[in-house]
Image (spheres, rainbow, N blue to C red):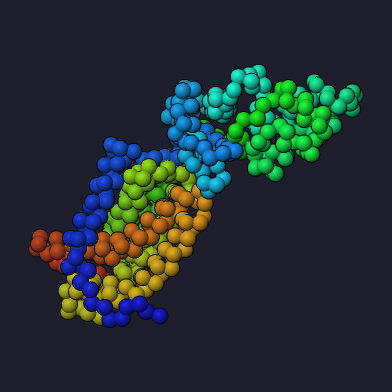
Amino acid sequence: MEFFRNTNIDFLGKKWYFLSFSLIFSVAGLLSMAFWHGIPLGVDFRGGTLVYVKYSHTPDPDAIHADIDRAGLKNARVQRYGLASNNELLIQLDIQETSEQALDKGKTQIIQALEGRASSASAGKQDLNNSSSLALANYLLEKDPLHLGMDANPRYTAIAQAIVNDRDKVKSGVLDSIDGLKGVVDPAVVASLGDGFFVSDFGIRNVEIVGPQVGQQLRKQAILATLYSLAGMLVYLALRFEWIYGVAAVLTVFHDTLITVGVFSLLNKEISLTVIAAILTLIGYSNNDTIVVFDRIRENIKLLRREKLSDIVNKSINQTLSRTILTAGLTFLTVLALFLFGGEVLRGFSLALVIGILIGTYSSIAIAAPILVAYQDWRTERGQRPIAMPMRTGTGQNSPKEKIKV
């Protein structure tokens, strides 16, 4: 199957348009990283507390951020999480200390800030939507609404667990009222709970905590993983083709990575561990496309030894264009579906892949190949011989016929 047959597009003739496009996006990304949003690192790299909050109504992120700010929690981030109908928010709080007490303090402070609007009638009472089964069991043991006496401990522990299960599993983490527990536990227990508990309009679904030291280590490992992958590609392509091929491929991947990170900075989207995984996937994908074009250029150099390198490069790109559109198009449709329907957890990962596939496919044609021609033109202007682009054999040795000058 082919989309294009016998195309003759002058890609190198449009190289200045391509370079202008790349320059605009690269500079915009660099300016955003330097002066506007910086590199928006996620909690995985910064360290901090992630609190997933479920509301009984549609929450207002701006009002909630104002409540958190008034509570003295600076630099907190509040954003919608998941589907709008789920009424969920993700609250992030930077943590600068590493003790367990300091880390747990972040969760407690966020809960207190969110409960700041509770009515005076709730003063001195516990929040039923954010109480543990242990707290419930202890309260019931003290009040003993069922008058169980010596057998109270196991019975009230089971009742407390039933309340928590109904809240978290049946009602998605938020009770509308204490009366909603009627039918779940004994009416005497429900009446007793009203004396010591109130029901807020939110419930904490999950809490994730990463210390800043762990975040710093993860950040270092992510940078090293990216650099090692670039170095490995440079060595492979230098041995498999020629060193200029390796340099061109690494510059192309650096271009792709810069634009991808720049877009995240411009959109102020956080870079998490899953985004780093997507960037590493992008490096491999972009490199694969580049190698396909380079391999065709190498074959055509041997067949069309009398033609100029620029003509050979254009012909090679046109010959691989149908294959590039087919593979890139199918992959793009897959990651686009993941971006649209994969949910908030995979949003950063899929966004990086969507950007990366578009930029990676474009750069293999518009950036990598012109670098080869530009390098030869530079050598020619300096009065040096044009570069030899031999075809390596499996043993790493070149026959005289394979060293072809263009």
| Residue nearest the viewer, comparing 257 with 28 | 28
Q: Is residue 98 visible?
A: yes
- Residue 90 on image: x %, y %: 51, 38
How many numbered circles are shown?
A: 0
Is 197 on the left-hand or right-hand side of 240? right
Query: Which image quarter is the N terminus in?
Result: bottom left
Residue at coordinates 36% horizontally, 53% vertically from top-left? 230
- Residue drawn at x 44%, y 34% is 62
Viewer can see residue 399? no
Relative image position of residue 241 (x, y in whole percent):
31, 66
Q: Residue 2: x, y in percent?
A: 37, 79
Which residue is at a point 27% across and 49% down the rendered structure image? 26
Say if 74 sits above or below 366 in the image: above
Question: In the rendered view, would you say 86 is above or below 197?
Answer: below
Whole-percent x and y of residue 172? Answer: 65, 42
Q: Quadrant of the C terminus?
A: bottom left
**Image-based side of 209 in relation to 16, left or right:** right
Relative to 9, 59 lies left or right: right
For residue 190, above or below residue 358: above
Residue 51: quarter of image: top right
Residue at the spot 42% in from the left edge and 29% down from the top edge: 75
Q: Nearer the viewer, residue 261 or 248?
A: 261
Q: Which quarter of the picture shows residue 200?
A: top right
Quick one: 46 or 111, which is closer to the camera? 111
